[in-house]
Amino acid sequence: MRTRFLVLLSVGVVAVCSVALGFRSAERRVLFPVPPTPPQSPMVGADVERTWVNIPGGRAEAFLLRSLSPSRGRGPLIIYAHGNGELVDYWLRQFADLQNEGISVLLVEYPGYGRSTGVPSETSIQQALAAGYDWAVLQPQVDPKRVVGYGRSLGGGAVCALARVRALAALVLESTFTSVKDVAAEIFRVPRILVGDSFDNLAFLTSYRLPVLILHGESPFPYPRRGAWRPRHPMEPSRFFNVDTTIARRRS
């Protein structure tokens, strides 16, 4: 009887482990749908500096889009973190207006994305952004006291993770979720205990006391109800702007 019990227990443990590993693999494919890497590195001009930062287990590619008003001296820096299905290559020419206003922008590619090595995860992305931060604040055109984290979608979780380990003057979160666990439970009905990379932004922001700008539309996709930000999540001194998606669609 005891032997049979141990056999059944072993089978049960193996089954649970198999399910957990299978879910973990599926989670990574959904959370980090790495797009194809362009065959060639993007051409950069005099206003863009390309570098590599060392991270545990590899290195990450980074681009500093320099301020185009060097006469102003040290200026603000925005660290921009892109969505989960994007590459930094897509954003190299999207910040000219900020550069013209004397603001530099840092783009750090996630591990496992583009030409960066490694495997994407909450920890590895935090390490890559922290390494990029450490390099960027040493540049002569950057004021270390005026560094802002700006994240879109998954990038919101990335800059919140960065703010846990580096000093950021403010945060901008665009179309970001409260946590991956909320999204997994809401959309896929997945038990929270099975979620590995939680990116628990809400838990972090409840104790974050610097300015936060949160931008989110009313559309239920991709982060409905519990997964999306709502005014029921008040955080001082942040403000919540509800974007009219009907107007946005009409203008597009």
Image (tube, helix red, strand yellow):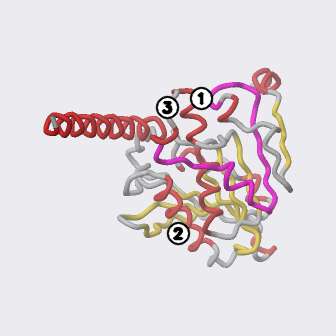
Looking at the image, do the residues carrying marks 1 and 2 touch, with CB atoms under 8 Å apart?
Answer: no
Q: Is residue 132 left or right of residue 229?
A: left
State the CA–CA distance, disc 3 to disc 1: 8 Å
Residue drawn at x 63%, y 56% is 159
Q: Nearer the viewer, residue 142 or 44?
A: 142
State the CA–CA distance, disc 1 to disc 2: 33 Å
Q: Residues within 10 Å of mark 2 (few under 14, many from 20)?
A: many
State the CA–CA distance, disc 2 to disc 3: 33 Å
Residue 39, percent across and down?
38, 45
* Residue 198 lies within the magenta run: yes
Question: Could you tell me what secondary structure mostly forms the magenta stretch?
Answer: loop
Q: Earlier in the sequence, mark 1 or mark 2?
A: 2
Residue 143, above or below 205: below
Q: Nearer the viewer, residue 127 or 42?
A: 127
Q: Which mark is residue 190?
A: 3
Residue drawn at x 69%, y 39% is 175
Q: Which mark is residue 131?
A: 2
Foreground mark, 2 or 3?
3
- Judged from the image, the secondary structure of the residue bearing numbered disc 2 is helix
- Judged from the image, the secondary structure of the residue bearing numbered disc 3 is loop
Residue 97, above or below 189: below
Tell me which amino acid carries mark 3: Val
Task: Say which quadrant the N terminus sits in.
Answer: top left
- Judged from the image, the secondary structure of the residue bearing numbered disc 1 is helix
Residue 185, percent across and down?
56, 32
Task: Write down the residue under mark 1.
Answer: 186
Tell me which amino acid carries mark 1: Glu
Image: magenta residue range: 195-223
